[in-house]
Amino acid sequence: MLGHLGWLRGSFGAALAIAVAGLATAVVFSGNYAHLPWLVAPLGASAVLVFAVPASPLAQPWSVIGGNLLSSSLGLGLGILIEEPVLAASLAVGLAIAAMSLARCLHPPGGACALLCALGAAGPEGWTFTHLLPIAANVGALALAGWIYNNATGHRWPHIIVPAASDPGDAAPRHTREDIEATLAAWDEVLDVDVDDLDQFYRAVSERAAARRRGP
């Protein structure tokens, strides 16, 4: 009723993490930086990934932290440099995807961070790199909450691949990791699942099928 992963678990965790991030950021920047936002919208998308699909490669700590901060920095820099909102935002999102991919921290909300920061810096509000501070606080608090909550509710985060039970008999896998990589390359698609997870999943399926053939 609650779904395989548990939508109630994910919903409560995300709500709790957003509250913690907002309150912590508001407290830390309550003095001279009170004019800064205490929550940024892309954090909501990050929360969906961290708490609803914590095993996704896009939801791992380095993706959440590196993707958001790298993209925010690019957005701010381009917005300050170009000063034309649409052009700055367009370049920021495109370059953020490239940078996240190269840095192995691809995170969809990072594109939103790049867009938000480019518009903020190029627009009338005139955002500066000071605005990176609350974003960093938001992201750090979310990651900490995700680490505590996911592990406490039975979902190891960062995600750890669970190896399939070893069975040297007829359940032995008839494939290699290289076979999976070659198949993915032939498909020419990016799947939101780690190659090693696919490998262990296929091994587990093969072993279950072999156990069924052997009978009780």
Image (cartoon, grey):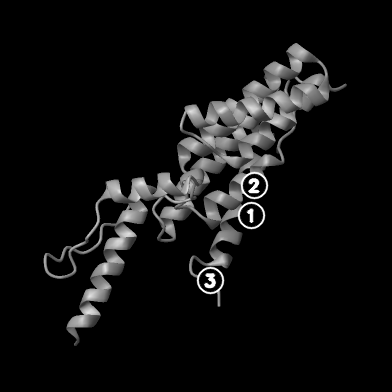
> Of label 1 and label 3, which has the lower sequence position?
3
Secondary structure type for disc 2: helix
Left or right of 176 in this view: 88: right
Viewer-side label of 1, 3: 3
In contact (CB < 8 Å): disc 3 and disc 2: no
> Of label 3 and label 2, which has the lower sequence position?
3
The outermost residue toward the top is 81
Which label number is shown at residue 180? Answer: none
Which quadrant would residue 87 be assigned to in this image?
top right
Q: Which residue is mark 3?
A: 3
Three-letter residue code for mark 3:
Gly
Q: Which is more toward the observer, 74 or 135?
A: 74
> Of label 1 and label 2, which has the lower sequence position?
1
Kindly identify the residue that appears in the image at 51 percent across and 41 percent down.
143
Q: Which residue is mark 2?
A: 45
Distance of label 1 from label 3 (alpha carbons): 18 Å
Kindly identify the residue that appears in the image at 22 percent across and 61 percent down.
173
In contact (CB < 8 Å): disc 1 and disc 2: no
Q: Tell me if residue 77 comes above or below residue 162 in the rendering.
A: above
